[in-house]
Image: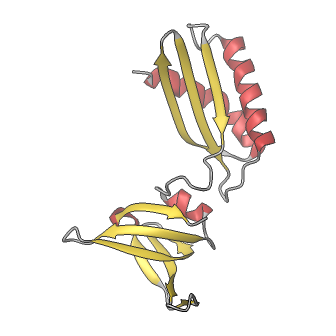
């Protein structure tokens, strides 16, 4: 429904994102009543986008939207934000952002039996995530053992442990 507008917004925002060395993680456009809402989630390749950087992108995008009259409906809101640490990890780039961090990963094997992995993301390859599993004993001692390789296509859900 908003594909053309989405393309125009991405074109306008790209130079601003280059300036702060960020990328679009998600772009949502929806109309509620008479207001068009643009929600843009941005982050850096290594994670850690600041509030100030989100503000810069927000201000410059607002200015460009007004200057180029991209949105015909004058009643709109723009929200630029970071993804937050508790958002789902979905893509190869998302996994790259959490290298060295503690995650929970849920996978399904060929029989669709869910499996849970908890560990530290060690490396991200083209189609795999390699983690160092964490095992907790009854005495609350945490140990790590070996490396487990998980195919990204088999991951149902993944989240960073906070």
Q: Within the image, what quadrant is residue 101 found in? A: bottom right
Task: Point out residue 88 in the picture as x, y percentages from the top left corner.
Answer: 49, 54
The mark total stands at 0
Q: Quadrant of the N terminus?
A: top left
Q: Quadrant of residue 72?
A: top right
Q: Position of residue 7 (x, y in %)?
A: 52, 27
Viewer-proximal residue among 52 and 64: 52
User: Which of 137 and 3 lies nearest the eye of the viewer?
Assistant: 137
Residue 161 found in image quarter: bottom right
Residue closer to the observer: 81 or 152 = 81
Tell me the residue at 62%/50% (across/down): 84
Residue occupying the point 67% across, 56% down: 47
- Is 77 on the left-hand or right-hand side of 128? right
Q: Residue furthest front?
A: 139
Locate residue 104 relative to residue 68 in the image: left or right. Answer: left
Q: From this view, report whether residue 130 is shown above or below residue 64.
A: below
Q: Residue furthest left?
A: 111
Residue 85: give x, y in percent of width and height. Answer: 62, 56
- The residue shown at (56%, 87%) is 140
Image quarter in which the C terminus is found: bottom right
> Percent position (x, y) of residue 6?
51, 26
Q: Is residue 130 left or right of residue 56?
A: left
Residue at position x 63%, y 73% in the image: 100
Q: How is the image coloured?
A: secondary structure
Figure check: 76 above or below 102: above
């Amino acid at each position: 429904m908003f594909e053309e507008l989405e393309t125009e917004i991405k074109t306008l925002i790209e130079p601003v994102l280059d300036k702060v060395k960020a990328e679009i993680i998600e772009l949502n456009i929806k109309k509620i009543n008479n207001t068009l809402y643009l929600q843009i989630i941005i982050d850096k390749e290594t994670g850690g986008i600041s509030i100030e950087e989100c503000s810069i992108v927000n201000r410059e995008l607002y200015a460009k939207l007004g200057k180029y009259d991209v949105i015909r409906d004058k009643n709109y809101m723009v929200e630029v934000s970071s993804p937050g640490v508790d958002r789902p990890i979905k893509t190869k780039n998302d996994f790259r952002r959490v290298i060295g961090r503690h995650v929970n990963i849920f996978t399904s094997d060929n029989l669709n039996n869910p499996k849970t992995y908890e560990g530290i993301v060690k490396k991200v390859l083209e189609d795999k995530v390699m983690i160092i599993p964490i095992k907790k004993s009854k005495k609350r001692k945490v140990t790590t053992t070996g490396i487990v390789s998980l195919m990204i296509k088999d991951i149902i859900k993944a989240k960073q442990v906070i």
